[in-house]
Image (tube, grey):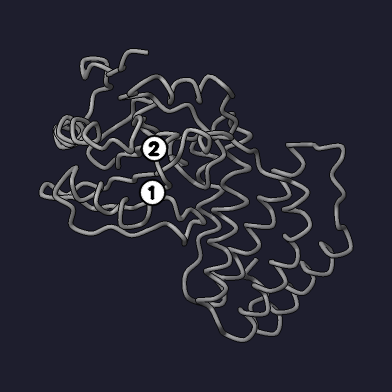
Amino acid sequence: MLEFMLPDSDWPRMPEAHRAFLVGAIPIFRTFSSLSGVAAGGSFISRQLDEYSDLDLIVVSTDQAAPLTRSNRQEIASRIGPLLVGFTGEHVNEPRLLICLYGSPVLHVDLKFLSAAEINPRVEDPIVLWDRQGQLQQALDADTAAYPPPDLQWIEDRFWVWIHYASTKVGRGELFDALDLVAYLRKCVLGPLALQRAGVRPNGVRRFEDLPPTTVSGLVATVGAHDPSSCCRALSASIALYREHRAALADPTLVCHSEAEVQSVAYLDAVRRALGLDGAA
């Protein structure tokens, strides 16, 4: 099969720094006999690249090549541009990811190193930029992308424990811990549920500000300041928003933990009273 190369005239509009990086990097990727192709994901797919975007690249090794070592990946990253620093993605449970900063100009580039067999399952359909012998496209054609929706039962099984735990932190005065937990709820529960209801990818709080103002304001209410009253208000707003999303999604199979809900909300109210914050709800 003939080598495929996507003409840069078919790329989406993007800042010159992004375009210059890709123009320089792709020919260098081709020089590595261990690599069979490169595809672009993220904002490249949605054609929403702007000056604040990073580049998400999937770097695919050949079936015949030995698995790439960390030093192999670092070498590739160093060759394709002026690498300032790069580190692996264990903190996001993805050790195959190399998170890179290039410059100058400064540019964030994520390099995800996969074999063709590791492409599926996948959450999006990347755009093939270069494919040495069609192996990359064949792997993409073998399956379809599916972004996992929020698991409402998984959330319901944990949500009221989280509310109680955050309330204990407010009561003890460990406000940073309480604020961190509410931030987690925004990113992993409330944001994804709102995005799911809006019919867009439920990816944390990504591009949440593009949603209707009333939806955005509901999430803004969960942002607390470093004082007990504000933390209590943020927790109460989180509870109200979760209840709204849970009702709107109306999953008939959902098993609600009603008694845990009642008691955890009552506990937050008791903490509020103990701190003399009866009007903080």
Q: Disc 1 designates what residue?
A: 68
Real-space CA distance between mark 1 and mark 2, rounded to the nearest whole angstrom: 8 Å
Left or right, 27 with reference to 37: left
For the C terminus, the image quarter is bottom right
**Residue 41: x percent and y percent?**
39, 33
- 18 or 133, nearer to the observer: 133
Q: Quadrant of residue 222?
A: bottom right
Q: Quadrant of residue 164?
A: bottom right
- CB under 8 Å between callouts 1 and 2? yes
Q: What amino acid does circle 1 point to?
A: Leu
- 192 or 29, nearer to the observer: 29
Label 1 secondary element = loop
Residue at 31%, 57% (x, y): give it: 71
Q: What amino acid does circle 2 point to?
A: Ser
Residue at 34%, 23% (x, y): give it: 131
The tag on residue 61 is 2
Q: Earlier in the sequence, mark 1 or mark 2?
A: 2
> Within 10 angstroms of label 2, few (less than 14), some, or many (20 or more) residues?
many
Residue at 49%, 46% (x, y): give it: 205
Residue at 22%, 39% (x, y): give it: 51
